[in-house]
Image (cartoon, grey):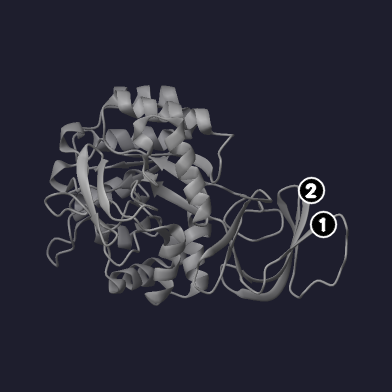
Amino acid sequence: MNHKMITNVNVLLPHQLLPSSTVWIADGKIERIETQESLQIDDKYERIDGQGMWLIPGMIDVHIHGANGYDMMDGTEASIQEVSRVCAATGCTSFLATSVSSTIEDLLNMIRSVKSVIGREHGAKIAGIHLEGPYLNPKRKGMQNEKYLRHPDLDEMKLIFQEAGSLIKMVTIAPELPGGLELISYLKEQGVVIAVAHSDATYEEAKEAFGAGASHVTHCFNGMRPIHHRDPGLIVAAFEEPHVSLQAIVDQVHLHPAIVRLMHRIKGPEGMVLITDALQAMGLGDGDYLFGGHHVHVTEGIARLADGTLASSTVTMNEALRLTVENGIPITDAVQMASTSPARILGLSSKGKIEVGFDADFVLLNEKYEVQWTMIAGVIS
């Protein structure tokens, strides 16, 4: 049945909440929204009772590496499919398959496995690929494996685009490296979101990168030169640039709640994106894992390398949403940061909002932010 009506839901829009509403769906698109409990009976529509819970736009994770024991860098379709399935189960309807710094062979294998899964995902849809590296600064490497870090290489990047083409949606680089600005120019020509992280860029170097076309900061505050009052670095440069948006890992580990509030106060929900940056421990819990060529130990949900360096996160999108609200951000803003803002940044013009004509990508959440079901293009997954 291609027609559905979701009744008795509190619909969260970017700036308001519509209580006790009904959303009508036809052929995977939002047909209309009624701001009262619908009494209309139409046998053509399958009726789904939302039981007074929240209906939010499907969340979009622009930065995820793995889930449930599967690492997308292993080059297998099974890993991509498992991340797709776990994303949907945790309220995410679209995601960017995200690489870590590796050999060119491993990266191309990852790209091929993503290409083979697109169009037949078991859960959340692949919106493209996010290359996190390998053109990153060893000084701010975080969990990135230093033996794979290298200076920007235009020939290598062109080879990557030969394999991936328009699937590359976001590239994270350290712009201060030799060849960084030339790479930004090339990526800008390709229409890619150019992000900055794992970078020791000074304020001036970051300003130059943002002026050249960089417009995003990957996991802001993590893996970069910290703010100092005489050396403000790339974070303050990003704060000053209206066109630059910020990723936030809201897991109560990577960012203090006051920093989350500060980012929100400066950038607003339009300029912030919630991400998981999850590794394969997401969904499995504590234990030992191999990630990015490193041994990673997870204790109480916190992933670290042997030297104590944070190694991605285990947070899910629905947990990140809950924690953002608990940190003091209004729920309508938090939903915008999880759904609307990433959709706009990636140019997904029919996603990220509950609005007539948009894709019927929804999540039904209870008051504890637990996912009751996820709907993708009108189909509950």
Q: Residues within 10 Å of mark 2 (few under 14, many from 20)?
A: few
Q: Residues within 10 Å of mark 1 (few under 14, many from 20)?
A: some
The location of residue 317, given as percent across then percent down, is 44, 58
The location of residue 108, given as percent across then percent down, is 37, 25
Badge 1 marks a residue whose secondary structure is loop
The residue under the point 14% across, 67% down is 229
Label placed on residue 1 = 2
The residue under the point 37% across, 72% down is 265
Q: Is residue 9 toward the left or the right of residue 96 in the image?
A: right
The location of residue 212, given as percent across then percent down, is 33, 43
Query: Residue 101 is drawn in which quadrant?
Result: top left
Q: Which residue is mark 1?
A: 45
Specify whether residue 14 is in view: yes
Q: Is residue 286 toward the left or the right of residue 275 in the image?
A: left
Tell me whether the residue at label 1 lies in contact with that at label 2, contact meaning CB atoms closer than 8 angstroms.
yes
128 w.r.t. 207: above or below: above
150 w.r.t. 214: above or below: above
